[in-house]
Amino acid sequence: MTRRSRLLLTLAVFSCLVLNLLSGGQVPAPAADTSLRTFFTVRSAQKDNTLPPEIRKEFDKDDGSPLRSVAFDLDGDGKEEKFVLCGVPSAAGGHQWLVYDPARGAARGVVVGTIVFIGRESDDGYPKLETYWKQGGDMSVVFHYQYARGRYGRIDTLAMTLWETSEYFRAKPPLDLNKELVEIK
């Protein structure tokens, strides 16, 4: 390498460092994901004595503890479906949520996660769902669910490192835990 090329390379590296320092080391956040309608976490689940005991058979495991739920009208018919939270994590390690339709007495599938995102896009009249949870160590997991033939089924899985998790949440609109189940604009 010639002296001149070393000098140019040094100037290029120095310029990058100076520009990074001037920007505060910040990279602009991507545009907010407007495909999300709302979200909720396990802290939104309230004790629900109206649920029939036979729905417990839908969970991988169940300890018989009181069931808690989050109500939300998924299909826009004016009647709320319920996300029923089981007291025992799934075999994968995340919280189990049974999507239950009390008006029809129908189980619509189990989703797994600590945070449940409800999308704007739908399949067969029901919104797409996305769940997130920290699996342990430096890993997080995201599942994507789609509604078909009367039930939610998992269609995709993402296992993420800490950096990937950070990027995942940077791509989401800001999540205010005091505004769970509020429409995301």
Image (spheres, rainbow, N blue to C red):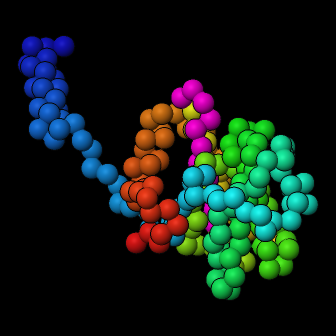
The residue sitting at 68% across, 77% down in the picture is: 80
Residue 42 image offset from top left, x and y in percent = 61, 52
Relative to 93, does residue 32 appear above or below in the rendering?
below
Q: Please state if 26 lies on the left or on the right of 60 as rendered.
A: left
Magenta stretch: give its range.
128-138
Image quarter of residue 4: top left
Q: Is residue 27 magenta?
A: no
- Of the 4 image quadrants, the one containing the N terminus is top left
The residue sitting at 78% across, 73% down in the picture is: 101
Image quarter of residue 63: top right
- Of the 4 image quadrants, the one containing the C terminus is bottom left
The residue sitting at 48% across, 39% down in the picture is: 164
Relative to 177, does residue 16 appear above or below in the rendering?
above
Relative to 74, does residue 160 appear above or below in the rendering?
above
User: Does the image show residue 157?
Assistant: yes
The residue sitting at 35% across, 60% down in the picture is: 31
